[in-house]
Image (cartoon, rainbow, N blue to C red):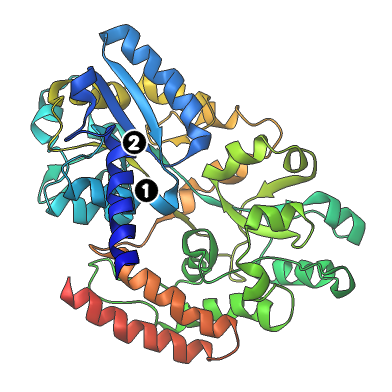
Amino acid sequence: MKKVIVSVLVVLLAATTVFAGGSKAGSGAASGTLKVGIWDQNQAGGITKVLADFTAETGIKTQVEVTPWNDYWTLLEAAATGGSLPDVFWMHSNQSQRYMSNKLLMDLTDRIAKSNVAKMSNFPAEIVSLYALNGRQYAIPKDLDTIALWYNKKLFTEAGVPFPTDRWTWNDLKDAARKLTNKAKGQYGILFTPGETQTGYWNQIYQNGGTVISADKKKSGFDDPRTIAAIDYVVSFVTEGLAPDLTVAESDAMALMQGGVVAMAQFGSWSLSGFKANDYFRQNCDLVMLPSSNSGQRATIYNGLGWSASASTKMLEQAWKLLEFLSREDTQRKLSETGIAISAYKGAADPFTRGFPEFNVKGYTDQIQYAVMRPYSKNTNVWEDMSVLTLNDVWNGKMAVADACRSIAQRMNTMLAAE
């Protein structure tokens, strides 16, 4: 019990320190500096550079504070409880409904209406809606992302297998995975894990015409025969020995590709900065669009982050000025040019593709036309975590795909009803 209490105190203290510099409610007020919370170290440099333009223009200082994704939401929740949220911070579709409904985010609606530059029509309506509740807007769209198939050119060449193309189907993917699997070398054709939902099998579900959740967020799609068939296809790579089981697959995906353990894997566009900084990936890896289903249907899960502000910040006007600055086309283009993410601003994606001449970045941007919004509801994490844990038993061969999917659907429907 003492250990539990100490752990909770450590988390709360860390949240106060990381997110608020040790004081309350967007602690930047004491120093006259806006605290900006993000979770991706790869983006910190580019964002800091752009925010320097904001400071030069307005005189308002900013400080970017990075907390890794695995800790970000734990610490953010603790900071919210303690009234010490960052002044401005990233928001995600998994959490937005909860933060908006609990009135933790600044309501931007009236300010947007009066602004000459912060126009939500400049962004995809689906991403705007991620951060809206009851007709009120709580975040400025930041970016969008898609998923692509990455492959190790070195392993393909050694196996005498032609590189993937944008014309690949599920059959092509399976055929190549067979040829690239080499048990003697401990080498597998591809990587799939139940824990990778957005970058993994959710894409195959929608390529096959299935769903994860209904449009009205009231019903699970896991018992849809098309969903079951898609997951069965993905799991077949594991059961046929073409993809590693969980003892290997739960390792870092990037390390598995770099180490030659897997020849292919699906990664989100947000990974590009890290891959560009990696000598091995620059020299030996590239990407293409995700293969279509055998019927020719394409889909890629996409999502978009939002820039939000704390409802309790002591620097209300300064925080809004920063959000308004971040909504501008010139700012969005500068962020896109840094190569940190595909801008959510309509027509501002091209600079991003020019930032990675080493890779076929169009494999990401060309898929935007087939994009399906990342499945979400008010409490996404609750049913998503449950589905991952259930599918672990499928990956381990302890449960049939159809049985697992129906079990997930039943419990997910109960969870959605409770929302």
Q: Is residue 243 left or right of residue 250?
A: right
- The residue positioned 72% from the left and 82% from the top of the image is 240
Q: Please tell me which residue is depicted at 45% across the width and 74% down the height of the picture.
A: 388
Residue 37 marker: 2
Label tally: 2
* Amino acid at circle 1: Tyr
Of 51 and 299, nearer the camera is 51
Q: Residue at x 60, y 88 (%)?
A: 397
Give residue 35's mark. none
- Residue 366 appears in view: no
SS category of the residue bearing label 2: strand
* Residue at image mark 1: 72
Instruction: Residue at 51%, 72% (x, y): give it.
Output: 208
Quarter that holds the C terminus: bottom left
Q: Secondary structure at mark 1?
A: helix
Image coords of residue 195 (percent x, y): 50, 67
Does 58 appear above or below 175? above
Label 1 neighbourhood size at 10 Å, few (<14), some (14-19), many (20+)?
many
Please tell me which residue lies in front, 310 or 242.
Answer: 310
Quarter of the figure that contains the N terminus: bottom left
Name the spot of residue 177 as percent of width and height, x first. 76, 69
Q: Earlier in the sequence, mark 1 or mark 2?
A: 2
Question: Residue 216: x, y in percent?
Answer: 22, 67
Distance in Å between CA atoms under marks 1 and 2: 9 Å
Tell me which corner region of the image, top left, top right, bottom left or bottom right, holds residue 291. Answer: bottom right
